[in-house]
Image: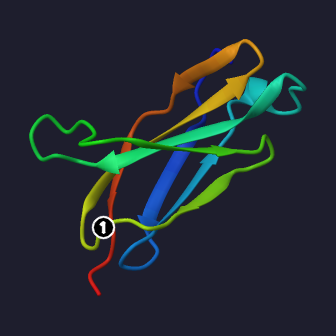
């Protein structure tokens, strides 16, 4: 893939989970070489806005959303999505930030 997924959205889905959705890059629609998506997420450390420690979730090619679970309560997360093809990973989407809920 040469373009990242777009329209990335993220919202709190409870005190320990986030709901993430995105639209595929136009070139990825119906692309047989698309193997799936990789969602990268991690707590923002408060300094430079980068991941404190990132985790990765791999999803099927027809996925357009994910539920991230087992997260820290009331914490700010940074989330990106990238398409994965047979030749490797594509560029990451623009990052979004969202916070898990309080209790």
Which residue lies at the image location 57% right of the left edge and 37% below the top edge?
Answer: 6
Compared to residue 86, the image places residue 31 above or below, namely below
Q: Nearer the viewer, residue 26 or 57?
A: 57
Left or right of 82, for residue 37: right
Q: Give the image location of residue 94, x and y in percent.
A: 43, 34
* Other residues around mark 1 within 10 Å, as few (<14) / some (14–19) / many (≥20): some
Residue identified by numbered label 1: 72
Q: Quadrant of residue 86?
A: top right
Which residue lies at the image location 74% right of the left edge and 22% below the top edge?
Answer: 85
Q: Residue furthest left?
A: 47
Which residue lies at the image location 13% right of the left edge and 34% below the top edge?
Answer: 48
Q: Quadrant of the C terminus?
A: bottom left
Q: Give the image location of residue 101, x and y in percent.
A: 32, 77
Q: Secondary structure at mark 1?
A: loop
Q: Quadrant of residue 26?
A: top right
Q: Quadrant of residue 29?
A: top right
């Amino acid at each position: 893939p040469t373009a990242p997924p777009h329209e990335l959205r993220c919202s709190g889905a409870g005190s320990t989970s986030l709901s993430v959705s995105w639209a595929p890059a136009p070139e990825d629609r119906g692309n047989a070489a698309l193997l799936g998506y990789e969602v990268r997420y991690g707590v923002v450390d408060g300094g430079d806005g980068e991941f404190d420690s990132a985790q990765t979730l791999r999803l099927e090619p027809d996925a357009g959303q994910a539920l991230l679970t087992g997260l820290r309560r009331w914490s700010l997360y940074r989330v990106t999505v990238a398409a994965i093809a047979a030749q490797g990973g594509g560029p990451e989407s623009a990052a979004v930030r969202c916070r898990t809920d309080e209790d």
